[in-house]
Amino acid sequence: MAAAMVASALLYSQSLMTQLLRRKALLLVIVLVLLLLSVIGMRSPDLSVSMGDQLLATDETFVAKTSTFKIGSCVDTRAVSSKAIVLGSASANEELTMTRFRFHKFDTSHYYNPSLLPALPDSPFDYVGFVRYDRLSAREVHWCYMNWTITTGSGRSFLDCIETAKILPTPHFPSIKGSCEKFKHYENDFGLMDPRVFWSPFGEPLMIVITNSHMACLGQYLIDVRVLVPELSKVFKIEHVPIRYSIYTELNDASSPYSMFHKNWFLLYDDNNRGFLSHGMHPQIITEVPNGLVNIAADNVDCLHNIIYGASSAEIHQGTNSLRLTLCDFPCVPTVENTVLISIVHAKYMNYPDMFYRRFLVLMEPVAPFRVIARTRNLIYAGADVSNILFSFSLTWDTTVRTHGSWREFDSLPASAPSTSSTSSTKSEGKLVKRAELAGKPAAAKPNAVARAVPAAAKPKSLPKPIARAPAAAPPSKAAAKHDKPVAAGAKTNAENDGPHVRPEPAPWQHMKDADQMMDKMPFPYNNTLVSDWYHGWLDDTIIISFGMGDMFAGFFQVKARDIVNCLIKCDAMP
């Protein structure tokens, strides 16, 4: 009896062990399957198409260093969905997040919509910053030399003015009586608004800014910033570059009748660096500078028709200036086949109080009529509150972190060769050097190369009188920079801005159609006319995106060009 019970117990134990082993084996299989699914999920996330967005085939192997970039290829899809792509800030900010500006200490006034001009390698400062500044009823443009600094409380990096920001002279342009309709208070002394400062391909620091119009209520004017801040010619070593826009030049309005407010237009340049003006991206409206009033934009596939995601109260607005990008790493040869123009546009949603923007980089062909060929998904800047009003305002190549030398080493054709070809340079191997190694070191001359003559600086067509020119002096030190602020005719001084004043005479101005483009006098150092040290870059270069936040503050974001064009959506692949 006892033996039978023992045998029964043993049989039961063996059966129980067998069941447990089977369960463990089943659990192990389940765990392995889950791990396998997880790995597959990380490699190929769910990127299902919605709202008309189409994700193109993923190419895990990125293009070789000097090969042509494939529009639509995806390098890293972990931060990409069918609608958005998350960008981490590169270069100086090791926390990968956006960076703040500080133009004024202990000042609660609103300053936003900034622009940055990166300094030269041997400069005692890192950037020149410009910003819209609103206080009470005054609208001003402030500027200063800026350096990186670190907050004592959190140890975070930000850009700070070396000394108190200066005010650009404000012109007096009365608008046409009645042109502002219910906004009659805009008709006189509106001030300066939204100063978008950028480089032309020739090395001109230009500004498009809003103030009272001679054609409508508020218009946009183009001016060379060196007219307002003469010392910048020496700071950026561009004394040889002629000043084409020596007075406020109002941009032509191609619409009929004229719109009341002109905003967010930008210049773009073709493969021979002729200027064109983009009035709108949806629909696309482009006119030729200086006297174009006819829209030359192609009637092509509308690449932006579905970025508003079906919202009933959304609009598409232009945002930044343009840059030229070659879709391969330096030193591949830029051609019209591998180069594009880029700019950021916005989908603006106006459902109060839930008003916000989505941001999209658009790619255009580098030659007229500048057909839009692709766009990104909604750009999410890490560390920024993109659910609020975040308006991308300007783009700049950040040459302060550029890790390669000048194209001059690779521009091998003799200077006597025609300079109108966009494919005339030959590729050459060269050592990539850091910015610190570039400081004070001119590019080595190539053997048997013919030096290209740089045209002497042409005398500006006309200058407003009087203009106070800064005395020749050494660049400002980091500790204390001294800047003389010129006062153009018709401008208000700081004292006048702070209280009642006698209205000055109207400032000098001209229509864009009357501006002399002086193309035969503009210096261009390279045989390949697509290459520019100011306006052009490669995939391995860094772009600064400067933006306003909530119409109150200013920030910027550094991103590799390669990252911002990841997982593009081609226009011809859209429904």
Image: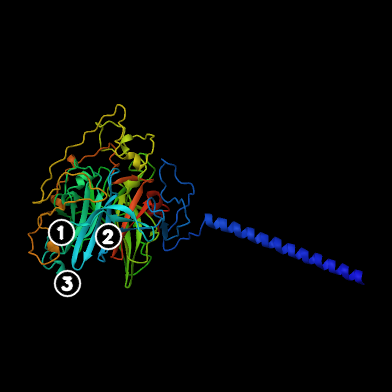
Label whose residue precedes the other's in the sequence (3 or 2): 2
Quadrant housing residue 238: top left
Q: Amino acid at mark 1?
A: Thr
Instruction: Measure the alpha-carbon separation of dots 3 and 2.
Output: 26 Å
Label whose residue precedes the other's in the sequence (1 or 2): 2
Apparent side of residue 527 relative to residue 385 in the rendered image (left or right): left
Instruction: Measure the alpha-carbon separation of dots 1 and 2.
Output: 17 Å
The percent position of residue 276, horizontal first and vertical second, equals: 23, 50
Q: In the rendered view of the protein, which quadrant contains the C terminus?
A: bottom left
| Label 3: how many Cα within 10 Å (few below 14, some 14–19, many 20+) | few
Q: Which mark is residue 321?
A: none
Q: Kindly identify which residue carries mark 1.
A: 170
| Label 1: how many Cα within 10 Å (few below 14, some 14–19, many 20+) | many
Q: Amino acid at mark 2?
A: Asn
Q: Kindly identify which residue carries mark 2.
A: 113
Quadrant housing residue 314: bottom left
